[in-house]
Amino acid sequence: MKRITILISLLALAIIMVSSTVNAAPVLQTEGEDYVVQADDWLSKIAERFYGDVSAWEQIVEATNAKAAEDGSYIAIEDANIIEVGRKLWIPVPSDDQAMTDESAEAVAEEVIEETAESMTSGDATISLRLMETSDLHVNLINYDYFRDEQNDGLGLAKTATLIKQARAEATNSLLIDNGDLIQGSPMGDYIARSQGLNEGQVHPVYKVMNQLGYDVGNIGNHEFNYGLEYLGQALAGADFPYVSANAYDANSGEPYFTPYIIQDKTFVDNAGNEHTLKVGFIGFLPPKIMQWDKTNLEGQLTVEDVVVSAEKYIPEMKAEGAELVIVAAHAELDMSEGENSAYYLSQVPDIDALLLGHVHQVFPSSDFADTEGIDVEVGTINGVPAVMPGFWGNHLGVIDLTLEQVDGAWQVTSSQSVAQPISERVDRKTVSLVETDQAVIDVIQAEHEATLEWIRQPFGETTAPIHSFFALVQDDPSIQIVTDAQKWYVEKLIQGTEYDGMPVLSVGAPFKAGRGGAEDFTEVPAGVIAFKNVADLYIYPNTLKVMKLTGPEVREWLEMSAGQFNQIDTTVTDEQSLINDEFPTYNFDVVDGVTYEIDVTQPARYDTSGELVAPDSHRVINLAYDGQPVADDQVFVVATNNYRAGGGGSFPGISSDKIIIDAPDANRQVLANYIAELGTVNPSADSNWKFTTVDGVNVVFRTSPSETTVTLSEAFSNMAPTGTVNDEGFAIYSLDLSQ
């Protein structure tokens, strides 16, 4: 019955087409008009719009190519299947003497009906649909590293935009989705949130760009909450496209805080040129751990549900409401230890047609996941579900090409191919761009870019020695030392006159830039003037300072968790052994200043990366002392840290918000800036409060920046030296002598 109704509708449409095309068929003439190609345009659609005849596209091609031969503002159409958005076409006025007769029009109509009916009854309609994803852009809109104050062609949506436009031009049907962690993460994000602000009606620069690029849907990431819910709402108001996020709820009403999902009618063209309208469902998920990471901003306002639980609730609703295709944007990692918040288990929820991932700054498909059961890195599927993850900072565009076939009236994904397209590559230790910069992106946010540059260049202090993080994972480090010094200075003043006055103060810091973002992702501040860009480079997150009260054993276990940064070194092996555990995030390698200690890497890690106790009898942290005396079990400390760690971020054992004694009003970064400004001149030299326990006869290596500056700085240390090797990721390999 459904097919009969559709065929009757097609017949009526064909009759209308006959009446509208008689005496109106287009032919090439000198008179006509310009037309600029829009998103989702194709030649047959444009021909139907102007002439009521899809077959007239050939005359548009002929006319445009004739124009291109004499007018450089036109570009000849070499492939009728590819017309880029923004291209100018010449639409000729039809001549009366070339009009279509009634008989020929009726014949065309009969042919259209016959071909369409045959296609529908045979069930062989096929649609090629391209999904494009960005994720974890972190306000990296321009190919510019604000921390280094220089161009960097390895990042930036201005580069990714070129890939987006190319990928869109290659495809008949496409959709563009962003997967969160968008409004925070670069100095431009801080400038907009902390300095400029967003007035009513003012559009955040990320949305100026994304609106221009024509995004279809967005999802919320965890860093969207770093500046609070009010600011998030102000920012989202500038998006010209809808947002979805299904697992966050209003803590008071229990209602979804965001729109959980949407179902949109999307018109696609099949491989035979016929149009089909599909109901496409989009649903998003965010990490439940935001309630730990941003507790100060979210407590009492939001509750968050496990990802798989929400998916099992909402996706059946979407199907019941008619969704023919379900696209999931999950700001989630593949790590199976995350349980019901893992994208791996999310992929096992029925009726998911495509899975767009993010959050952990990884690339999928890639060889990193080749040994995981259920994952096909050649095709790019997770438990059979097409998936992609596009890295971070715009360094890749995620693409999933889906083949949809209509079988018995229902659309099914019959095949797919996923790829993460890079914007650059490393050649001879240098970043080489693979795409041109999209000038339209630069132009739309030029004012914000220039304002950010002015903001980050403002000087307010001086350092007597260079501050860098090149060796932050293998020895006490100046980039951490200056942060912990500032926090200690702040807390000691904060507790004066309180019940905590006189208690020993410890300060915790971690290397935020120690290669997690690639071979160039290291802090480097030369001796001399310090500007805000340097402070932002030293402390890249907008955390707020928290003060905790901890016992000696709690401090020891904190350090044991931190010591998971290192692989276990086998003393019986003489072959090269890598010291750094790449699975352990460097921002979780906490150094506790105020105590001294050693780390014995010949022992197994006591905790795994998720904070689970895996080696109860192992103790890597030894000789823990305060003021030259062993730390006692009944000793109590005041500890300066940040809201992320104090709220349980990183799953450190025994560290939770109930141990917070002072909820400081200032951001850690601001504390650092105030410290430098008050002292005027700072000496950031590390105090060497921790070291590795001596190990003889082993060949240990670590990776760091390949820069010449790193080589020069290493010469001051007798226990390390460059090996002359650079790995596939562009990192220089250094040897480390643990016998010293």
Image (tube, rainbow, N blue to C red):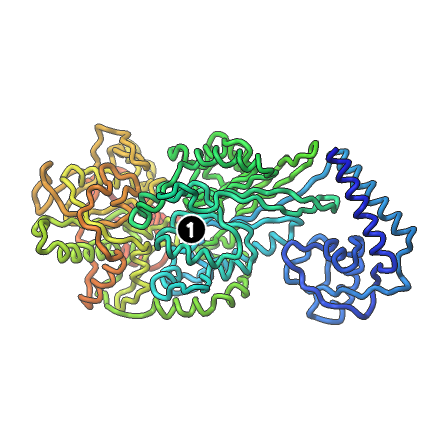
- x and y percentages locating residue 378 in the rendered image: 55, 37
Residue sitting at 69 percent across and 33 percent down? 407
Q: Is residue 735 visible?
A: no
Residue sitting at 74 percent across and 65 percent down? 90
In the displayed structure, does residue 635 sit left or right of residue 71?
Answer: left
Q: Please tell me whether mark 1 sits on a helix, a strand or a loop.
A: loop
Q: Is residue 31 above or below residue 740?
A: below
Q: Nearer the viewer, residue 127 or 159?
A: 127
- x and y percentages locating residue 107 in the rendered image: 89, 47
Q: Is residue 340 above or below residue 136?
A: above
Q: Amino acid at mark 1?
A: Asp
Residue topped by disc 1? 181
Which image quarter: residue 740? top left
Q: Nearer the viewer, residue 73 or 643?
A: 643
Which image quarter: residue 454? bottom left
In the displayed structure, does residue 104 sit left or right of residue 672?
Answer: right
**Residue, far front:** 253
